[in-house]
Each structure stands twice: as structure tokens, then as C-alpha cells.
């Protein structure tokens, strides 16, 4: 698998719009790990937003770094990942990392590779123990986390949804 994590840029606009479109065509209107991408009508506004989030300039947001996972040869965007620099009580069970794989690329091992690359990036942030969560019925995400040495700690109920809480020692 030849993936790389890269910062989203203005030059990626068309590829990112196609990425979002594929989720919508699959009746998915929430993309985990995109740091609000689907809430912006203007791609450049989103780029400004994620830059401000990374620098800690958005008061109601935990600082995080957003990357796209792209095929090294074709540059096709396979997925997206957001790495939170820390957790607080209010956002604790959101976990350190959120990620998504575009619908047409699922069940091919990309999720595990995207998370593995994200764990490498998290080392640069000195994150040595990471919390990850997923919905209990999201078997694919459970497997991705477990393939990356995630240790299940517990199950929690939040707003009537059942979530699994994992830790990964980095």
C-alpha cells in the first residue's frame, strides 16, 4: 500500500470535492476525521478553519491536525484523518483520532494503513498513549483499531449509542 498523509491544499480542491461527493452519493453526510469539511460551502474557508484549529485559535475546538491520505502514485484521496493534540473532559470520548475511508476504497486495508500513518504523525506531537473510540456496530473500525494494537478498555453509552473505548500505546 503506497499511501502518504499530506496537508490539504488549495490545489486539492477538485479532488476534495469529488471525495465529499462520493460520501454523499453513498448517503453519508458525516465524514469522520474531516474537521468540519462538510459544513463549509467554500473549500478555502475550510482550509483557513483547519489552519486556525491546528494553531489553537478556535476557542471551542481542541487543537488538531488534519491530513488527507493519498495514493503516492495517482494522488487519489483515499481517506482523511484528524489528530487531536490533547483531550479535555468535554471531548474526552471523541478520542485523539478520527478517520474515514472513501466508500469505494473500503474493505481493502486502507483504514488500517491510514491509522498506522496517523499514529506515526501523533508521535511528532509527543502523543504516546492515544484514546480511540468507535460505534459498537462499526465492525470495520473495530478491526482497524485492533490491527493497530488497540486495547479495548470498555463500552460506554452516549446519547443512546453504544461506543467502544480503545487505547493504543504509541
Image (tube, rainbow, N blue to C red):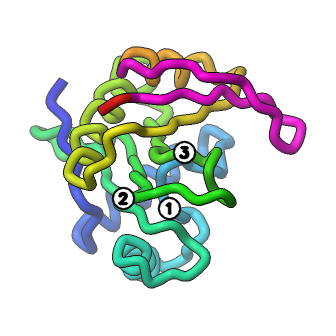
Residue in front for this viewpoint, 142 or 39: 142
Q: Quadrant of residue 6?
A: bottom left
Coordinates of residue 4 in the picture (x, y in percent)? 18, 42
Residue in front for this viewpoint, 92 or 25: 92
Asked if the magenta segment contains residue 157, the reply would be yes
Above or below, comparing residue 36 to residue 112 in the picture: below
Of badges 3 and 2, the one in the foreground is 3
Quarter of the image with the C terminus is top left
Counting residues from the start of the chain, the first of labels 3 and 2 encountered is 2
Q: Quadrant of residue 135?
A: top right
Q: Residue at x 65, y 57 (%)?
A: 89
Quarter of the image with the N terminus is top left
Whole-Å distance between the Cαs marked 1 and 2? 7 Å
Q: Is residue 104 visible to the viewer in this orientation of the structure?
A: yes
Asked if the magenta segment contains residue 74, the reply would be no
Residue extending farthest left? 73
Whole-Å distance between the Cαs marked 1 and 3? 13 Å
Q: Residue at x 43, y 60 (%)?
A: 17
Query: Which residue is identified by label 1?
Result: 35
Counting residues from the start of the chain, the first of labels 1 and 3 encountered is 1
Whole-Å distance between the Cαs marked 3 and 2? 14 Å
**Looking at the image, do the residues carrying marks 1 and 2 touch, with CB atoms under 8 Å apart?**
yes
Counting residues from the start of the chain, the first of labels 1 and 2 encountered is 1
Coordinates of residue 165 in the picture (x, y in percent)? 61, 29
Q: Which residues are magenta?
A: 148-168
Query: Which residue is identified by label 3?
Result: 95
Residue in front for this viewpoint, 43 or 169: 169
Q: Residue at x 20, y 52 (%)?
A: 124
Above or below, comparing residue 149 to residue 87 in the picture: above
Amino acid at each position: 500500500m503506497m499511501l502518504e498523509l499530506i496537508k490539504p491544499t488549495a490545489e486539492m480542491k477538485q479532488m476534495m470535492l469529488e471525495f465529499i461527493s462520493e460520501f454523499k452519493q453513498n448517503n453519508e453526510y458525516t465524514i469522520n476525521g474531516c474537521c468540519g469539511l462538510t459544513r463549509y460551502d467554500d473549500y478555502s474557508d475550510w482550509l483557513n478553519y483547519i489552519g486556525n484549529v491546528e494553531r489553537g485559535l478556535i476557542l471551542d475546538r481542541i487543537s488538531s491536525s488534519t491530513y488527507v491520505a493519498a495514493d503516492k502514485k495517482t494522488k487519489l484521496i483515499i481517506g482523511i484523518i484528524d489528530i487531536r493534540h490533547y483531550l479535555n473532559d468535554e471531548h474526552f470520548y471523541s478520542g485523539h483520532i478520527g478517520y474515514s475511508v472513501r466508500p469505494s476504497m473500503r474493505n481493502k486495508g486502507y483504514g488500517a494503513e491510514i491509522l498506522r500513518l496517523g499514529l506515526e504523525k501523533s508521535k511528532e506531537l509527543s502523543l504516546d498513549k492515544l484514546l480511540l473510540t468507535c460505534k459498537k456496530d462499526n465492525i470495520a473500525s473495530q478491526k482497524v483499531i485492533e490491527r493497530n494494537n488497540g486495547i479495548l478498555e470498555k463500552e460506554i453509552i452516549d446519547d443512546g449509542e453504544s461506543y467502544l473505548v480503545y487505547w493504543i500505546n504509541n
